[in-house]
Image: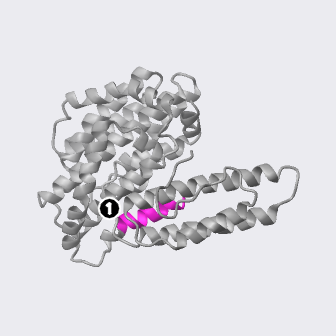
């Protein structure tokens, strides 16, 4: 599986993304008025890109649907231009042509930044944009592999959360991490046992989220990252496959992100966030999934998880508004975040 192999080359990054979720604190028609036939292999790639740049500069204040169509057409133009350059520069020096196309490409991205920020955007649109242009969306092998694993994660909903007060839950959490690091992970059974036990503790931890202001959990974050790394060490020893390690961790991260977001929204709704320090931490926790979930993670979401995420995306602005009141700051510009994050995403295309 090319997708999984490419991701398994970065185990440390994936492990860190998983640990952060614990923290407290193809040729398609545009269909628009500017749509023009595209030549698959333009004779003048710079001219083709220059013409597209001229077209996009004439656009203003597009809806999300129209914006998405423009981006899809841009990807087609870009692929055509740079494929042509790559083919025509074999055995010859056309560095000036490439440099010009790169400059034009940067100019197009700047224009899309302008279009994105031309009107308010939503968190649901941000997620939809990332999902729409995920390079993994049509990877059938990836989808089938995820479906094989999904029943395990669904079964976790039938297991009770760990019991106990804040101190007991934190003690149990530390004990599980210590035991896992001592024994290691050496099989798929070890992997699922660790995730299952940790999931029960994480759900219990979230019930005390609002009461952890000032609690030092740096050791839990560190050891969680180390435990996640154990999965890739097991893959290196060929005790489990890289595919298993990557997909289990990614789907675990999705589940934790959604659980954490829901706990934050519930705590804000129930007025459990009292201090500025708490409010800042909750803002970070709510922003983090929108910033970190990329096309790979979004592709692995179940239909149920995607609906949950979309529902919470609709609730996020109200939560931010309440947190801004706690911060006694109405100038945090949190309403601009979806557009800003969409702008950042554009620079990855």
At x 20%, y 35%, the residue is 162
Q: Position of residue 118 (x, y in %)?
A: 40, 73
Work out whether residue 128 can be spotted: yes
| Of residues 241 and 168, the one drawn nearer to the viewer in this rendering | 241
| In this view, 261 is above or below 149 | below
Q: Quadrant of the N terminus?
A: top right
Q: Position of residue 21 (x, y in %)?
A: 36, 48
In which quadrant is the C terminus drawn? bottom right
Where is 302 relative to 116, above or below? above
| Residue 126 placement, left or right of 311 | right
Residue 232 position in % (x across, y down): 52, 33
Bin the neighbour count of mark 1 within 10 Å (Cα to Cα): few under 14, some 14-19, many 20 and up: some
Position of residue 192 relative to residue 302, above or below, is above
What residue do we see at 51% from left, 23% from top?
A: 240
Does residue 347 appear left or right of residue 188 in this picture?
Answer: right
Q: Nearer the viewer, residue 141 or 107?
A: 107
Which image quadrant is residue 201 in? top left
The range drawn in magenta is 337-349
* 39 sits left or right of 146 in the view: right
Give above or below for 160 relative to 107. above
Is 175 a magenta residue? no
Q: Secondary structure at mark 1?
A: loop
Residue at which label 1 appears: 122
Q: Describe residue 81's horizontal placement relative to residue 325 as left or right.
A: right
Which residue is more in the foreground, 141 or 202? 141
Q: Main secondary structure of the magenta part?
A: helix
Q: How many marks?
A: 1
Residue 68 rendering spot, x and y as whole percentages: 44, 57
Q: Residue at x 47, y 56 (%)?
A: 31
The quarter of the picture where residue 36 lies is bottom right
């Amino acid at each position: 599986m090319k997708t999984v192999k490419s991701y398994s080359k970065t185990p440390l990054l994936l492990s860190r993304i998983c640990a952060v979720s614990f923290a407290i604190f193809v040729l398609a028609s545009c269909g628009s008025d500017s749509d023009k036939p595209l030549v698959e292999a333009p004779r003048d790639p710079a001219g083709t890109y220059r013409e597209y740049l001229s077209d996009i500069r004439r656009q203003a204040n597009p809806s999300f649907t129209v914006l998405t169509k423009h981006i899809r057409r841009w990807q087609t133009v870009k692929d055509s231009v740079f494929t042509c350059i790559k083919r025509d520069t074999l055995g010859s020096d056309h560095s000036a042509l490439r440099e010009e196309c790169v400059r034009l490409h940067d100019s197009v991205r700047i224009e899309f930044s302008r279009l994105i920020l031309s009107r308010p955007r939503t968190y649901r649109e941000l997620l939809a944009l990332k999902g729409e242009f995920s390079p993994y969306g049509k990877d059938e092998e990836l989808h089938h592999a995820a479906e094989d694993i999904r029943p395990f994660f669904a079964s976790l909903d039938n297991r009770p959360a760990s019991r106990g007060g804040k101190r007991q839950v934190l003690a149990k959490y530390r004990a599980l991490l210590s035991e896992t690091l001592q024994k290691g992970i050496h099989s798929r059974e070890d992997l699922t046992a660790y995730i299952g036990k940790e999931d029960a503790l994480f759900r219990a931890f979230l019930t005390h989220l609002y009461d952890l202001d000032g609690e030092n959990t740096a050791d839990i974050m560190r050891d969680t990252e180390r435990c996640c790394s154990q999965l890739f060490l097991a893959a290196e020893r060929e005790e489990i496959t890289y595919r298993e390690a990557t997909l289990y961790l990614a789907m675990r991260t999705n589940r934790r992100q959604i659980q954490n977001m829901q706990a934050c929204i519930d705590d804000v709704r129930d007025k459990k966030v009292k201090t500025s320090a708490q409010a800042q931490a909750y803002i970070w926790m709510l922003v983090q999934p929108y910033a970190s979930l990329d096309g790979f993670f979004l592709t692995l979401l179940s239909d149920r998880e995607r609906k949950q995420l979309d529902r919470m995306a609709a609730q996020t602005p109200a939560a931010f508004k309440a947190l801004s009141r706690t911060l006694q700051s109405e100038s945090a510009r949190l309403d601009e975040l979806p557009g800003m994050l969409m702008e950042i995403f554009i620079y990855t295309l």
